[in-house]
Image (cartoon, grey):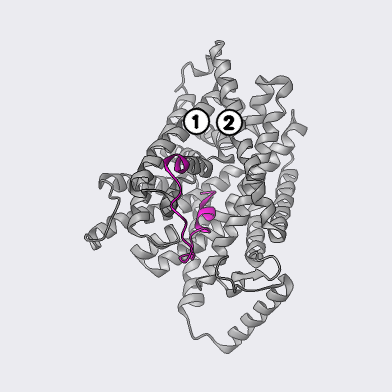
Amino acid sequence: MAKKAAMESLTHGEDKVRMKKQLGLLEGVAIILGIIFGSGIFISPKGVIQEVNSVGLSLVIWVLCGLLSMIGALCYAELGTSIPRSGGDYAYIHESFGDLAAFLYLWAANLIFVPTTNAIMALTFAKYVLQPFFPDCPIPDESVRLLAAVTICFLTYINCHDVKETTKMQNVFMFAKVGALVIIILAGLAWVCVGHTENFENAFENTSSSPGKIAVAVYSGIFSYSGWNYLNFMTEELKNPYVNLPRAIYISLPLVTLIYVLANVAYLAVLTPQAMIASEAIAVTFGDKILSSVAWIIPVMVAISAFGGLSVHIMTSSRMCFVGARNGHFPAMLSFINVDRFTPTPALVFLCILSLAMLCTSDVFVLITYCSIVESTFIMFSVAGILWLRYKRPQMNRPIKVSLWIPVTFVLICAFLVLVPCFERPIEVFMGVAITLSGIPAYFIGVAWKKKPKTFQKLNDKLTATTQKLLMSAKEEQEDF
């Protein structure tokens, strides 16, 4: 989820640009790992364990999330090669279910997925920065949200000012993410090897049997795997993609699953479920208990990772908003770029405001559930498009064609994950549904209604002109953005 905008911004509306097929299988696997690894693994383990209440089921859920991601990735491999249009889910839903459904996806993405993910990453950064200053007491809620808000505004400004600076730092951010995971895994396994296995005794004791809680726990796990449904975006860049794409999936996702399970084994070996639930930043609590004098390295690396991930997500997610406006599905002013720096400044400012609105709560697990339920619904519709197109257009060219049981299984699991939390998290579900359905009148008024009153058009023109003057922006004139 957190990398959706990153991949779509490279493909949405960019049909004239074609990458050279210069990536082999090894490069493909490396790209997939880079997309999936993020700050989620440093926050989601707490969300899983607090719902299921047992070590054993927690580890089972992490394995199941990996398997679900692999099944979904195979479905998207068929979608990406049979519908070779730019836009990812936007294109697949449009091809299968029409313009309104595609608009609702874009509406939900820009109003829910993107700003919520920005808020989650900003809150993660804030908690890991502040945790060392509050070792024996809870972090003040206002401090977390204030620092998160300042971080979002600062990175929005940086991306408006000079996008090149953010891209230059990606190697540092990637090193921080991978390095923190390696330290946690090695330290945790060393702890187990010296005989500390008491946390794994009676591993399934006190396990929650509520389907709703299990579904919510799966959402926390899936959040860390977000990015698996963008694997098909590599098709144009891969050598022999119809062979190497499935192979990259078979190699990378089991590897991610193994790393995530080992990281959770490390967490659970050192920390009890109660300690994980009580912690505001589990990697910091982990480091304090096992790394003693060098424990400071964990919060530093995780904070760098979250900061870098947020910077890139702000940069790339604005492009999806920008392209939606350029395609006529969002107000035209959001398709403008700064005349001096060629950045989509109006889109960046718009998403910054929405991201700040999501900071009404500092509970990242509420935000994860809220975001993931809506996103999973649209992912379910995308994969359901395979079944509908198999029936509607059986002769359609499908370079990669998965067995029918794969999309059927995936749709059924997604349906379970979407419907069951309605009873466990009704408020989050209602908010997501309400915001998504608000896109229906927005579509008919903003897109389908072509002959608008002159008063409306004059007001829109005046607002557009004001935005242009305020943000020094204009319509894009260059072929490549």
Q: Residue at x 68, y 79 (%)?
A: 465
Mark 2 near mark 1, Cβ–Cβ under 8 Å?
yes
209 sits to left or right of 291? left
Residue 96 position (above or below residue 231): below
Main structural element of the magenta stretch: helix, strand or loop?
Answer: loop
Instruction: Of the two numbered discs 2 and 1 on the same chain, state the one appearing first in sequence.
Output: 2
Q: Where does the image place residue 417, in percent across and percent down from the top left?
A: 41, 45
Disc 2/disc 1 C-alpha distance (Å): 8 Å
- Name the residue at the top extreme: 195
Q: Which residue is mark 2?
A: 181
Give me the disc on residue 259.
1
Q: Is residue 8 magenta?
A: yes
Q: Is residue 3 magenta?
A: yes
SS at circle 2: helix
Asked if one can make out residue 377 in the rendered structure from this viewpoint, the answer is no
**Residue 334 position by quadrant:** bottom right
Q: Which mark is residue 177?
A: none
Structural crowding at the residue carrying mark 1, measured as other residues with C-alpha within 10 Å and reported as few (<14), some (14–19) or many (≥20): some
Name the foreground residue: 126 vs 95.
95
In-front residue for pair 171/215? 171
Q: Position of residue 57 (x, y in %)?
A: 44, 28
The span shown in magenta is 1-29
For the point 57% across and 11% down, the residue is 194
In the image, farthest residue toward the bottom: 454
Q: Amino acid at mark 2?
A: Leu
Q: Quadrant of the C terminus?
A: bottom right
Secondary element at image label 1 = helix
Q: Residue at x 51, y 24 (%)?
A: 265
Residue 92 percent across, percent down from the top left: 38, 60
Name the amino acid, label 1. Ile
Mark 2 residue crowding within 10 angstroms, few (<14) / some (14–19) / many (20+): many
Measured as percent of width and height from the top left, residue 150 is found at: 74, 51
